[in-house]
Image: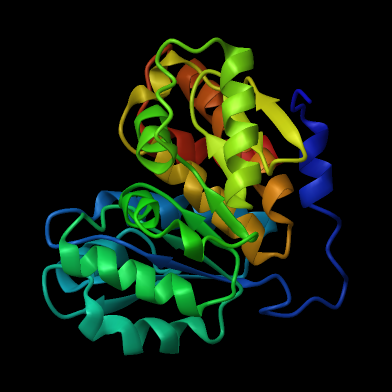
Amino acid sequence: MLLKKDILKQVYPKRKFNARKYDYGALLIIGGSEKYSGSPAFNALAALAAYRSGADIVEVIAPRRSAGIIATFSPDIITIPLEGEYVSKKHLKTLFEETKNKTAVVIGGGIEREKDTQKTIIKYLKKINLPVVIDADAIYALANEKSIIKSNFVITPHAHEFFILTGINLEEFTVNQKIAAVRDSALKLKCTILLKGNPDIISNGKQNAINKTGNRFMTVGGTGDTLAGICGSLLAQGINPFKAACAAAYINGKAGDVAAKKKKQSMLASDLIQAISDVIA
């Protein structure tokens, strides 16, 4: 199935006249470290852009320095600072407490691969039942504990992360071979996989989709983080994982196309974020 703009109508139905806060969900983003704040910031800003017709609340949990930086980007983002340079087991109580009133989670952006952090990711994911976008460094954690993968997980690897997760090297694969590899892996792991690339390939093992929006300028850092944020926003609204992944891929790529055109064939992830609401509109 080739994704087209009609996917937007499937995930953005007309809002109820008497809608209230929390009717459209709340997204929790877990990521960042002393060194990295950009990834969870892009997660949050993209989710904010997507929630102009989407989730009602976006909250970020990150180490204090990262949380402080993220808070300066927008008053719409709620931030919960953690003591220390990395997310660790001592923070699990806070993570679980902040998860209670959320409807979806994005985890992994900028969180790094410290042993304690990776173990914390596994302990956290084992105990929650919410839909989750697993991205970046969280994919490395999951690769060592595949038994905890759930059907409401959306894993968003690029080609190397897909290799880390599955052991399959896609370097010499044709598009059809990649589709088969993603489908077989999603079926085996019993989740949804969104392989980022040209094109994006999405599968839950039963349904498969191809997304051809996007362009060669989206190799800049942050565009995968925006994708994860959009997908998380859709999951928070109650969109099923496969459809959320499909719509997120289409929106992210199309926003990249709009941004590249406006910037005359060059762009940054922050340009893409500004184009998200235009694409949805």
- 96 up-or-down from 65: above or below: below
Whole-percent x and y of residue 168? 43, 29
Foreground residue among 144 and 114: 144
| Side of 165 relative to 141 (left or right) | right
Q: Quadrant of the N terminus?
A: top right
The residue at the point 68 percent across, 39 percent down is 246
The residue at the point 40 percent across, 69 percent down is 75
Whole-percent x and y of residue 215? 49, 17
The residue at the point 65 percent across, 72 percent down is 25
- 211 up-or-down from 156: above or below: above
| Side of 240 relative to 165 (left or right) | right
The residue at the point 40 percent across, 18 percent down is 217
Whole-percent x and y of residue 101? 56, 85
Quadrant location of residue 174?
A: top right
Report the colour scheme. Answer: rainbow
Query: Does residue 51 appear in this view?
Result: no
Whole-percent x and y of residue 65? 15, 67
